[in-house]
Image (cartoon, grey):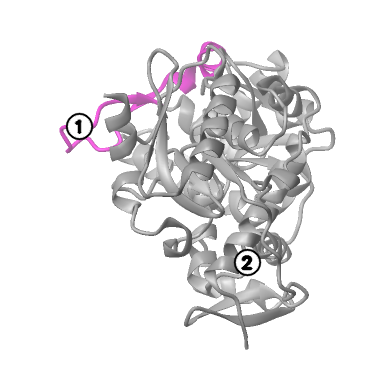
Amino acid sequence: MRSIDAAERRARLGVRHRLADAHRTDAVTDIARSLVVLHATDPATVFLSLGARSRGAAPTDVERALYEDRTLLRMLAMRRTMFVAPVELVPVLQASCSNALADKQRRTYGRFLEQAGFGDGNVAGWWAEVEEETHSALLARGAATGAQLGKDVPRLRTQVNPAPDKAYSKPTNITTWVLVTLGCEGRIVRGRPNGSWASSQYLWSPVESWLPGGIAELPADEARAELVRQWLAAFGPAPLTDLKWWTGWTLAEIRKALTRLDLAEVDLDGVTGLVLADDLEPVAPPEDWAAFLPALDPTPMGWQSRDWYLGPHAAALFDRNGNIGPTLWWNGRIVGGWAQRKDGEIVWRLLEDVGSEAESRLEAEAARTTAWFDNIRTIPRFRTPLERELTA
């Protein structure tokens, strides 16, 4: 069994995730492909993740890929998490994750509606009618906000209290429920936001107007195998537990997908890891590199077992739910964190001694990050101890 130590895994990370200087590019869609998908729960993450790996790209280049060239698409997929994906991967994500998620959302919302007495005993039929009315209204408009669709489809303004026995719960319109479910099914897509690139108030469009021909259908088993192959190419080698965590699938689904691939086992400092069989050649370390990565960046969120690049810094850089904040990187290791203050200043702190050369390189990355933000101000959706401390 071949052994791959932490140093080689860091080298792979620097090269394959386009963080080492020689591997950066201004082709933002290619960057996304290198990472499989981009985390998009926080809209700013998409832009900052791409900016950190580019040479001279600007937010307008990302907006062009998302909304004009449409080579990138925002969608819910693994672990009911929002991602931005290259459009050619969308059918894979749809078949492997999003279809099942749509079914789960309908069941969940259906229970809430049934408890509230809607549907006259046929909640599924009532819900299907609302979905069709909403889709038709969106086709007529071409693009719309949820509020606009609520005016066209009165039943979208139906209010339901999902947990009436809980003091914190309160009635809410079902607009978001319906739109999210239609989005999971691939019938509608999130388009350009109202506001800056850091905004999360998106216009919705029917998939027919966004992707000619809609989303191609694939068998679920085939799609899962392809997603695993792409993840291993970008994040391998890694333990099976990391793959299960990243996908959110059952162990049975993971094992079935693995049977379709040609794999090898490797030793990862005493833990068995999986790697594609044609990916066993050693990877030479790139030249020294530094990076400022945003909260929820796909690199640190790509593995569940993180000691080999995180070290002892989890308490300062993660929130209680396992979401990572903004991080400083040096040669494949997390060495500190950063934040943006209300006045736009980028502030950062090292959590270990990295030497003067590394500090100088990190200063340069801080300047690049400041320039990328320009006049945009953001606060990470999930705030971590160090990020809060730096902005206090």
Question: Which residue is at the front of the view, 261 or 373?
Answer: 373
The residue positioned 70% from the left and 60% from the top of the image is 230
> Image quadrant for the N terminus?
bottom right
Question: Which residue is at the front of the view, 70 or 215?
Answer: 70
Q: Residue furthest bottom?
A: 1
Question: Which residue is at the front of the view, 20 or 178?
Answer: 20
Residue type of the residue flagged with mark 1: Tyr
Residue type of the residue flagged with mark 2: Gly
Can you give x and y, in whole percent of width and height, for residue 261 in the image? 73, 75
The quarter of the picture where residue 186 lies is top right
Q: Is 372 one of the magenta-colored residues?
A: no
User: In this view of the protein, can residue 319 be seen by the observer?
Assistant: no
Residue 53 in the figure: left or right of residue 344? right
> Image quadrant for the C terminus?
top left
Question: Which residue is at the front of the view, 27 or 147?
Answer: 27
Residue indicated by mark 1: 168
The quarter of the picture where residue 53 lies is top right
Can you give x and y, in whole percent of width and height, for residue 86 in the image? 73, 42
The residue positioned 56% from the left and 53% from the top of the image is 331
The quarter of the picture where residue 172 lies is top left
Q: Residue furthest right?
A: 213
- Mark 1 or 2: in front is 2
Query: Residue 236, which numbered label?
Result: 2
| Element carrying mark 1 | loop
The residue positioned 47% from the left and 64% from the top of the image is 308
Can you give x and y, in whole percent of width and height, for residue 150 in the image? 51, 16
From which residue to which does the magenta span run?
146-173
Mark closest to the chain's N terminus, 1 or 2: 1
Q: Is residue 48 above or below residue 317?
A: above
Q: Residues within 10 Å of mark 1 (few under 14, many from 20)?
A: few
Residue 123 in the figure: left or right of residue 134? left
